[in-house]
Amino acid sequence: MKIHRLFALVLCLFAGIVLAQQSRSFTDAARGTTPIPETTKPPVLGNAVNDDVRRARNYAMQPPTIPHRVDGYQIDKNFNKCLDCHARAKIEVSQAIPVSITHYMDRDGHTLPQVSTRRYFCLQCHVPQDAVRPIVNNSFQDVDTVLQQVQAAGKTPKK
Ligand code: HEC
Ligand code: HEC
């Protein structure tokens, strides 16, 4: 009997803690104070950067960001607007950078005559940019910066 009562007490205490935690308001950089079960109202899209200047890549195999607007570009089973300029055969007219050889490879590393289906939806990996303040801070440094810091500190880079 006593054990039962103790068990019930512990259970109540536990439920109390869970309830208290749920009702505590929280703030998240991306969601604001919107509780997790609710959907936030996303901010309206701004004007994507359209300066046509290719940007440095931060690391090997980073998909380059898109330096031009892509609003309304059709990508579906019938037509791929991106390949209308970026396909190997189109670059003479468009002067765009042709998609690299990796875009023609299937997952087994075989090179196909056409862009691989896994590289068909370009915006899965390539994104235009917007001049906004990042909501989550990022302290990433590329390898050149790290090497410069090591050299400035008079140390030799670790092998
Ligand atoms: C009208 C032709 C045209 C279309 C359509 C087009 N692009 Fe481009 N793209 C270019 C040109 C030209 C450049 C070179 C930089 C510039 O002039 O903007 C470029 C640059 C890029 C780059 C930067 C490459 C690098 O090495 O920095 C990416 C990524 C890119 N485009 C992706 C896309 C994607 C994804 C789409 C479709 C949603 C698309 N482009 C549609 C012409 C086009
Ligand atoms: C699964 C991710 C992914 C998809 C989907 C994808 N790309 Fe890429 N793309 C990359 C990566 C990673 C690189 C950089 C390394 C490389 O060249 O493979 C790249 C590089 C590029 C480059 C620069 C090539 C160069 O030689 O500098 C262009 C242009 C480009 N992609 C356009 C496109 C277009 C257009 C599409 C759609 C038809 C597309 N990509 C689909 C990941 C992707």
Image (cartoon, rainbow, N blue to C red):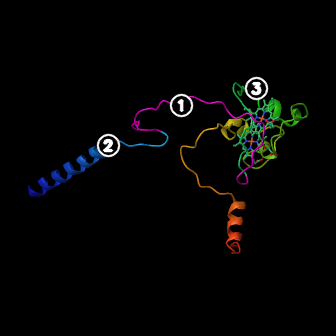
| SS of the residue under disc 1 | loop
Q: Marks 3 and 2: which is nearer the front?
A: 2
| SS of the residue under disc 2 | helix
**How many labels sit on residues?**
3
**Looking at the image, residue 130 lies above or below residue 148:** above
* Distance between the alpha carbons at the discs numbered 2 and 1: 26 Å
User: In the drawing, does residue 98 fall left or right of residue 19?
Assistant: right
For this rendering, which residue is in front, 54 or 84?
A: 54
The amino acid sitting under disc 1 is Pro
- Percent coordinates x, y for residue 113 in the rendering: 84, 39
* Distance between the alpha carbons at the discs numbered 3 and 2: 48 Å
Nearer-N-terminus badge (1/3): 1
Q: What residue appears at the point 54 percent right and 47 percent down from the top-left corner?
A: 136
Q: What is the quadrant of residue 52 in the picture? A: top right
Q: What is the quadrant of residue 94 in the picture? A: top right
Q: What residue appears at the point 17 percent right and 54 percent down from the top-left corner?
A: 7
Magenta stretch mostly in which secondary structure? loop
Q: Which mark is residue 43?
A: 1
Nearer-N-terminus badge (3/2): 2
* Residue under label 2: 22
